[in-house]
Image (cartoon, rainbow, N blue to C red):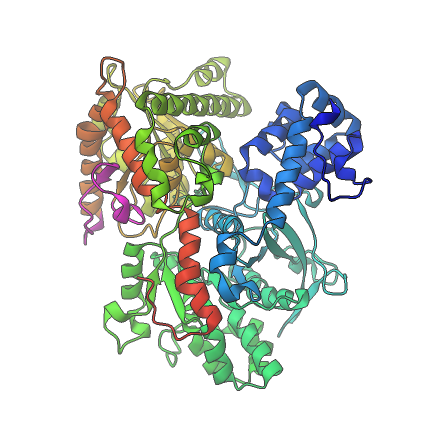
Amino acid sequence: MSQTEIPRSTSKPARDIWTEVTPQAMYDKLVAVSRNLWWSWHPEVVSLFRDLDPVRWRQLDHNPVALLAEMTPDQVAQRASEMVLFTRINQAHRRLRDYLKNTQSTWGAREGGVLGSMPVAYFSAEFGIHESVPIYSGGLGVLSGDHIKSASGLGVPLVAIGLFYDQGYFKQQLDREGWQNEEYQDTKVENLAMEPANDKNGKPIMVTIDTLDGKLMAKVWLMRVGRVPLYLLDCDVEGNRPEDRELTSRLYGGDLRTRIRQELVLGVGGVKALRALGIHPGVYHLNEGHSGFAPLEVIRERMSDDGLSFDDALRDVAQHTVFTTHTPVPAGHDRFEGKLIEEHLGPLRQHLGISYDQLMGLGRVEPQNEQETFCMTVIGLKLSRRANAVSSLHGQVSRRMWSNLWPWRVEEEIPIGHITNGVHVPSWLAHPMQLLYDRYLGPDWLGNVGDSETWQKVYEIDPGELWETHNALKSRLLEFVRRRVSRQCRRRNEDEAAVETARTVLDPSALTIGFARRFATYKRADLFMKNLDQFAELIDDVNHPVQFIFSGKAHPADEPGKKLIQAIANLRHDPRLANKIVFVEDYDINVGRHLTQGVDVWLNNPRRPLEASGTSGQKVVLNGGLNCSVLDGWWAEAYNGKNGFAIGLGKQHVDTALGDQRDADELMRVLRDEVIPLFYDRDADGLPKQWIGHMSNSIASLAARFSAHRMVMDYVKSAYLVAAGGLSSDMNMR
Ligand SMILES: *Cc1c(COP(=O)(O)O)cnc(C)c1O
């Protein structure tokens, strides 16, 4: 490469390794970039890593740390000169460096006020940041990941606390009968961009939690997610009993005792870790009830540091605590027996100077009711002064659900507001779409994705161009699905004919509908099967073909969920549907990204109102797909008649079976009368003009409102700033 390609920094001394072009210097730059997950939402940087070795890149789950560990600096240099990568390496490195330095001109610096010196501590049991970092299971984790990425982008002072699961969540494989098998794999710590977190004296942090049954210890890892540090507690340390060393191995594994111990580590251990780090949060944000014990430890600190009484400390800590509830499904709220609570919180309770009954009362709707177990959502609500649900409808449902906590208030005045979930645009937007938006949406549109104005220029995009870009993404999805499905067949030792069929499955010109999520029964993945014959006839129309791609895991203990998967996976044996319905194994962020970027339609048909928000459909919007959904969660406030399709009228049914049948009929009607005709209504150029009109309307009306940037700005304005200032709360999140 020529010398002129090397960026020269005038302010730096001459011996700056970053201006050298030795193989080692190039390699070090790549390593530096790989060690901040910032790379994962920059497509130019992702493709830089891919270009180093496309085959290994795929095999290693798109993990640049693992990829670079396999290569020597000389191999990297060789490859870089073949592929002319030097400029791109320098650019990636410089962009990251500038991003980390530039904290003064961000939205957070302008609007974040007092948060600057007292950051938000954001607690979550899982973080979905990238497929190569397997510490998430599904929607909650992806939401947390998107939250901290947008906090980073906006420059909101925030640190995140989670758990490090060295086996993560399971890998899913279906056997020949379509039955889900789970496999857990050890994650190699050295392949992750994390390092031990050190205390003020540079020593690795170890937190210790007393229980009545002995001490529980955890070390702390630091993972960098853009400007946000993510601290992960890990119980696999010497000194813990063998069973405790495995405590944080798996997400949502084990029994209730495992669960409460994990939550003790997350909440109480997390607060202790912050203290050891010398971080003094101004706000504690508990994302879901799992971290509900955290405020108890903060109360203990306030009592011992400032000599407050328990009641005064509680009042004070609650002012600084924000709680987000995520599920309207009763079984989705963690509950523990008094015995487990006392075993794990007994020592802390004694420090707080409160009785067993007082402690239990904090987790009960009726504090004196000894029949009631300890509920993590209840303690979250009681120890926070600002609580929110994750969509408008979920807010209504939550106020009703928890109205007994405030029996003296009418339902509208139950202090649970809502902030609707959103998605991190750079993470979910396909690169070709980004390039298209670059040309139409004006300069720095990516910096203003939370602003509706930004997206209005979408109407100026040439319809043909929008359609072609979408179709290129759809082809990419079908390639991906064929590769995956034929690999599935090969693994199951199916005959060559089956593998060959899989290699050409699906038709690029057919209307393609995606459905992927956790296979919980209330999400009704099998709704279309209630009218299977009618359905088969509808989609098997040579002139108007329709095809479906399914994906999703069932919780290992969820037999009915596994049966649903099996029923759908086995439709491949139905000759009417064989080439029209595929099931892609092992749903994760990678599968989710391909699907949401390539489908024509995203189908969502939960039993209303059990879907608190949902976010996959929001990812689809960004990429030009249309939603076809029950009016539940985010869609209940998003649908305007021209930006997608609604199943049903937004009513609840008292009789579940009857409701399911009505929705199944309605699903069939919407597909037959609205979705399919609109998609196949082509003009002389072969363009579905009206469909493309829906695409533009969907992007223009929804992209900003359902972005994580908008969501985080809402949290800052209506929750964090109030909590940090200790202002009286008027719960105006509704
Ligand atoms: C976006 C996403 C989710 C959230 O999905 P919903 O079904 O919309 O709640 C879950 N899992 C993965 C892998 C995702 O990417």
Q: Position of residue 652 (x, y in %)?
A: 20, 52
Residue at image position (48%, 53%) is 107
* 565 sits left or right of 50 in the view: left
Residue at image position (33%, 54%) is 391
Which quadrant of the view contains residue 546? Answer: top left
Residue at image position (50%, 56%) is 108
Residue found at the very far front of the displayed protein:
10
Count of labels shown?
Answer: 0
Q: Position of residue 250 (x, y in %)?
A: 58, 50
In the rendered image, the vertical position of residue 95 relative to residue 479, given as above or below:
below
* 679 sits left or right of 579 in the view: left
- Given residues 168 and 644, the one toward you in this image is 644
Residue at image position (62%, 55%) is 232
Predominant secondary structure, magenta span: loop
Q: Please state, as top left, top right, bottom left or bottom right, where the N terminus lies in the image.
A: top right
* 349 sits left or right of 207 in the view: left
Q: Position of residue 459 (x, y in %)?
A: 30, 32
Tell me, yes or no, whether the highlighted magenta stretch contains residue 640: yes
Q: Position of residue 113 (x, y in %)?
A: 49, 64
Q: Please state, as top left, top right, bottom left or bottom right, where the C terminus lies in the image.
A: bottom left
Which quadrant of the view contains residue 550? Answer: top left
- Given residues 297 and 387, the one toward you in this image is 387
Please indicate, yes or no, whether residue 106 appears anywhere in the rendered image. Answer: yes
In the rendered image, the vertical position of residue 205 relative to residue 434, given as above or below:
below
- Given residues 606 and 123, the one toward you in this image is 123
Please indicate, yes or no, whether residue 132 appears anywhere in the rendered image. Answer: no
Region rendered in magenta:
631-656
Residue found at the very far right of the displayed protein:
15
User: In terms of image quarters, where does ligand 1 lie?
Assistant: top left
Tell me, yes or no, whether the highlighted magenta stretch contains residue 326: no
